[in-house]
Amino acid sequence: MTKTKTSFFCQNCGTQYAKWLGQCSSCNEWNTIVEEIIQKEEKRNWKQNNTPKKVNKPLKIDDITIYKEDRIATKNNEFNRVLGGGLVRGSMLLLGGEPGIGKSTLLLQIALDVPKRVLYVSGEESQTQIKMRAERLSSKNNNCLILTETNTQLIFKAIEQVQPELVVIDSIQTLHTDYIDASPGSISQIRETTAELIKFAKETATPVLLIGHITKDGAIAGPKILEHMVDVVLQFEGDRNHTYRILRAQKNRFGSTSELGIYEMQGTGLREVENPSEILISQKDGDYSGTAIAATLEGARPLMIEVQALVSTAVYGTPQRSSTGYDTKRLNMLLAVLEKRAGFKLGAKDVFLNIAGGIRVDDPAIDLAVISAILSSNEDEPIAQNICFAGEIGLAGEVRPVNRIEQRILEAEKLGFERIVVSKFNKINKSNFAIKILRVAKVEDLIANLFA
Ligand code: TYD
Ligand code: MG
């Protein structure tokens, strides 16, 4: 047996130190450095009976064969889409997200759906709790085995018995390995257990899905190296008070990170939302002032969303500006542009802005709809229901072109809009579309078109 080695780690950022310090010099947090045993015994392998090491030979790229069906398509189409076509064999996936957002629900649903032998390991919930959750979900799979365990050596024992084709671990922060004495959730445990699981995944070509907790700033808890080690990092996000959830790839070694999956949390689990535009535009009869529809893109997916604005006379001295789902700084900028370029006296008005459906939008193409909604509320004049907007506003009040305009126009057309307002500077082949395309160069041109 080798000598026990210890080292000091910052629990916040994972930086390693040779001795204890009061403040981490990397992330400047106080009292986060803890001594951890990094190695107790010399040998660690996911298999108990140590098989002789296989030596890998260097190969020419032409000589490497790709095995057929190296992706496992789950029945969850949104999940497949985000992964770029299904789970790659031997890959390691990390799913992060706020507590209660639905991480366990999503992976249990996937585990119950795939027509494969699945081992679902939970360190957070008991078997009965998982059974109760599974009963709410409609899917059934007798090939899905549930195990409550946190010790990786015992998990690997179960794996050797069951021979699963897919392993789900809920969550990496609860796991611990015999070879390290640090407590579960500590930097060295997370790093070590992940390394063991990766070794297992690569050697047996079994995909492993990990759930990871996040810190209060939204990063995945544990060392940054965790994100480097795994092949795919997915983020499950959404507003807990709303039912929509967005699954986004932050890193994907086997596909693009611009794809995105949308789910709705229902009483019976997560429902895939195939046509998100229809649900994000609120159903209404009659015209209301202060709403405008924006043709945005979320990742690579066109999405029509409703922007709602309320402009009212300020009661207190300083007018209030608040927004939900949209950057408040950008809202202030747009209001300043309206004051300066279009002569609207919004300085003494409260302005509230809301993106319907509880989602957050960063796409600058929404600017035109934001301005339209504000003007509509200010004038108390509704905007026609069959018009939508896609354009960015510059500081000079110019309407700037946005990317993938044709995709946005196509989506608008598909959803039955009759007119779309875009920037004059976007190059568009009008003959491709039946929808009427209104091209504006300045905010003033928009105003002339808005209530006509
Ligand atoms: P959960 O998957 O436990 O979240 P996480 O693992 O990310 O912490 O999700 C829990 C929430 O989801 C809980 O607040 C209740 C809700 N939920 C439903 O609305 N419907 C369902 O069918 C299920 C299983 C959960
Ligand atoms: Mg959970």
Image (cartoon, grey):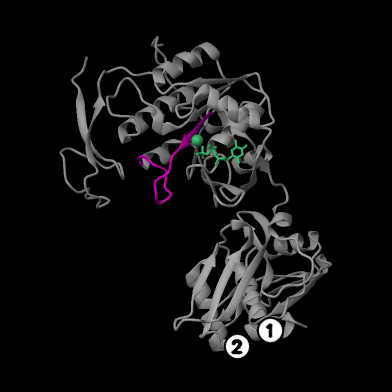
Identify which amino acid the numbered label 2 is placed on: Ala
Q: Looking at the image, which residue is at 64% across and 67% down?
A: 307
Q: Which mark is residue 342?
A: 2
Residue at 79 percent across and 70 percent down: it is 286
Q: Do the CB atoms of the residues marked 2 and 1 lie less than 8 Å apart?
A: yes
Residue at the far top: name it. Answer: 49
In this rendering, position of residue 268 left or right of residue 27: right
Residue 298 position within the rendered picture, expressed as x and y whole percent measured from the top left: 61, 56
Quarter assignment of residue 345 = bottom right
Q: Is disc 1 placed on a helix, strand or loop? A: helix
Whether residue 54 can be seen here: no
**What segment carries the magenta color?**
208-223
Q: Is mark 2 within 8 Å of ligand 1?
A: no
**Above or below for 423 versus 404:** below
Asked whether residue 160 is drawn in magenta, I would say no
Tell me: residue 281, above or below residue 150: below
Residue 91 seen: yes
| Disc 1: CA contacts within 10 A as few (<14), some (14-19) or many (>=20) | some
Q: Amino acid at mark 1?
A: Ile
Residue sticking out furthest to the bottom: 343
In terms of secondary structure, where does tag 2 sit? Answer: helix
Q: Is residue 186 left or right of residue 266?
A: left
Disc marking residue 447: 1
How much space separates mark 2 and mark 1, taking CA atoms? Answer: 9 Å
Q: Nearer the viewer, residue 141 or 322?
A: 322
Residue 370 x/y as whole percent: 61, 72
Mark 2 or 1, nearer chain start: 2
